[in-house]
Amino acid sequence: MYLMILGAPGSGKGTQGKLVAEHLGIAEVSTGELLRAAVKQGTPLGREAKGYMDQGLLVPDPVVLALIREILDSPAGARGVLMDGFPRTVPQAEAVDRILAERKARMDLVLLLDVEEGELVKRLLARAAKEGRSDDNLESIQQRLKVYHSQTSPLVAYYEKQGVVRCIPGMGTVDEIQARVRKAVGGKA
Ligand code: B4P
């Protein structure tokens, strides 16, 4: 089973993705987390990604595409995966579709988390105070929101054409939202 969790920065992708992947017994993989780990370890990938991430920009597709192929080709990825934070652009989505088609699979479900913009900024600033992530400052948050609208939100129409999008109201407590997510995946589990 291949699922994706889609939403603006701060919409709860990581939070809800981990919980629902555990519920379904599949791996949850976040390109954001993998990129942050690469930055921390100072690998060539991390050195290339850091500047883009700190500015709130997407890491260029050619760099991320190699990472996506690695994820989907891994033993866990081959069994099914919940994709958190990727694909992030239409070229990434086309690449994911191609890789899945090679193994006669497809994107089964896209969970779209819908959260008001003021709430997104509030959550990310709260995380900044707690965790000090280098891209959780007001300037970078505003840039990430702009990038979401221009480069990532076109994925909604892309996957609507495949009939796999389920919109989840993303306001409320983590448990309330998780209940909605589980209902949406219910028929697929
Ligand atoms: P990500 O790691 O994907 O970061 P994000 O969009 O900010 O979302 P995140 O998952 O961290 O936050 P969440 O909504 O769960 O990407 C970071 C950067 O990496 C990107 O800007 C880009 O540069 C790069 N990148 C990653 N993938 C890429 C790709 N495929 N292509 C190119 N570049 C890529 O949660 C936010 C906060 O809200 C948390 O603190 C959480 O505790 C809180 N929260 C969640 N649910 C809540 C609720 N119901 N109520 C209150 N708070 C809640």
Image (cartoon, grey):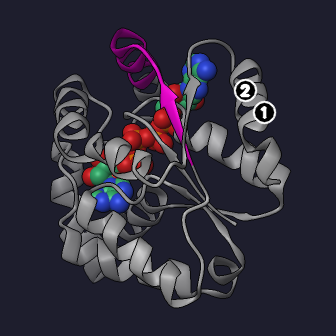
Provide the secondary structure element on which disc 2 rests: helix
Task: Please identify the quarter of the rendering in which residue 118 is found.
Answer: top left
Disc number for residue 28: none
Structural crowding at the residue carrying mark 2, measured as other residues with C-alpha within 10 Å and reported as few (<14), some (14–19) or many (≥20): some
Residue 46: percent from left, percent from top: 30, 71
Task: Please identify the quarter of the rendering in which residue 175 is found.
Answer: top right
Residue holding disc 1? 183
**Is the shortest distance between ligand 1 and the CB of mark 1 under 8 Å?**
no
Q: Could you tell me which quadrant the N terminus lies in?
A: bottom right
Tell me, yes or no, whether the highlighted magenta stretch contains residue 37. Answer: no
Tell me, yes or no, whether the highlighted magenta stretch contains residue 116. Answer: yes
Residue 158: percent from left, percent from top: 34, 51
**C-alpha span from label 2 to label 1:** 5 Å
Q: Could you tell me which quadrant the C terminus lies in?
A: bottom right
User: Is residue 6 rendered to the left or right of residue 2?
Assistant: left
Task: Please identify the quarter of the rendering in which residue 145 is found.
Answer: top left
Q: Closer to the camera, 25 or 43? A: 25
Q: Amino acid at mark 2?
A: Arg
Structural crowding at the residue carrying mark 1, measured as other residues with C-alpha within 10 Å and reported as few (<14), some (14–19) or many (≥20): few
Q: Are marks 2 and 1 in contact (CB under 8 Å)?
A: yes
23 in relation to 184, above or below: below
Residue 85: percent from left, percent from top: 44, 52
Q: Which residues are magenta?
A: 110-126
Residue holding disc 2? 180
- Identify which residue is drawn at 33% across, 43% down: 157
- Identify which residue is drawn at 16% across, 39% down: 150
Residue 129: percent from left, percent from top: 43, 23
